[in-house]
Amino acid sequence: MISGDSRYDRHLAGKGRLNAAERRGMAIYFSEKAECFHCHSGYNLNDQATHVGARRTGPLFHNTGLYNLGGTGAFPDDNQGLIEVTGRAGDMGAFRAPTLRNIAVTAPYMHDGSIATLREVVDFYAAGGRVVADGPNAGAAEPADSWTTLLQLQLKDSYSCDIERVLYSRHVAIGKDIGTEGRLRCLDRREYDFTRSRQHQKFTIRLCQPTVC
Ligand code: HEC
């Protein structure tokens, strides 16, 4: 299914105009409030390539909070995402962001088809995680936690640290922004303090010395 000449493509190419509702939707989509474009971007509206021939090196798998089995953030068996390949706890429930091209005609949604309509997908993102009311997968999922994926990547790149676990983390108000700070332990027992003053900024990471923390 090819959608290279959609109304959106024509708008980008300067060959057509979006109507007011479409423009409002686009503004929300590309805003820091809804954040959709961070994972669904580029010509394919996913995060695997930004332009022909380019590959992104950022975090390519994300946990958007579909399940929280047993209160541990776990996903159903045989459906656990990247962890099934890497065995790393932080990869539980992490999936690739699929393209949103032709999305209106490819229901149902998510890797397991567990969301039936686009309306419900938007409600799911607005709620920051899904509540499965009953059945074997019942539970209220944690809000999407893309910051841990980013942190994980940065630690691996700069300090060769694989996170064993996040010891604590909290949101802190910094001016009008909400920042994040906390401490984590690597598999080799090193501990680091991390802070990030605004969403989408890199973390400042500091080795935790016994005399300092
Ligand atoms: C942190 C990254 C991230 C952000 C931000 C994000 N998504 Fe997603 N999105 C994903 C991932 C990963 C999946 C696949 C999850 C799965 O299969 O379980 C997905 C799936 C979807 C799907 C279903 C696609 C399909 O083919 O089943 C839709 C629709 C969607 N997202 C729309 C949005 C919208 C709209 C926003 C903004 C409100 C948004 N996404 C924000 C990562 C993200």
Image (spheres, rainbow, N blue to C red):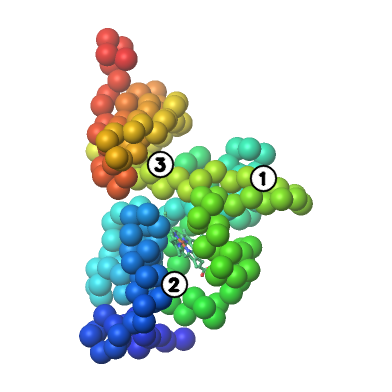
At 24% from the left and 38% from the top, the residue drawn is 158
Q: Which residue is mark 1?
A: 139
Circles 1 and 2, Cβ within 8 Å, touching? The answer is no
Question: Residue 196: x and y, percent?
Answer: 29, 36
Mark 2 near ligand 1 (CB under 8 Å)?
yes
Q: Earlier in the sequence, mark 1 or mark 2?
A: 2
Distance from the alpha carbon under mark 1 to that under mark 2:
27 Å
Residue closest to the eye, 96 or 170: 170
72 is higher (above) or lower (below) than 60:
above
Q: Which residue is mark 3?
A: 148
User: Residue pushed farthest front?
Assistant: 20
Distance from the alpha carbon under mark 2 to that under mark 3:
24 Å
At 26% from the left and 26% from the top, the residue drawn is 206
Residue 156 visible to an observer of this rendering: no
Q: Amino acid at mark 3?
A: Thr
Element at badge 3?
helix
Question: Residue 152: x and y, percent?
Answer: 36, 41
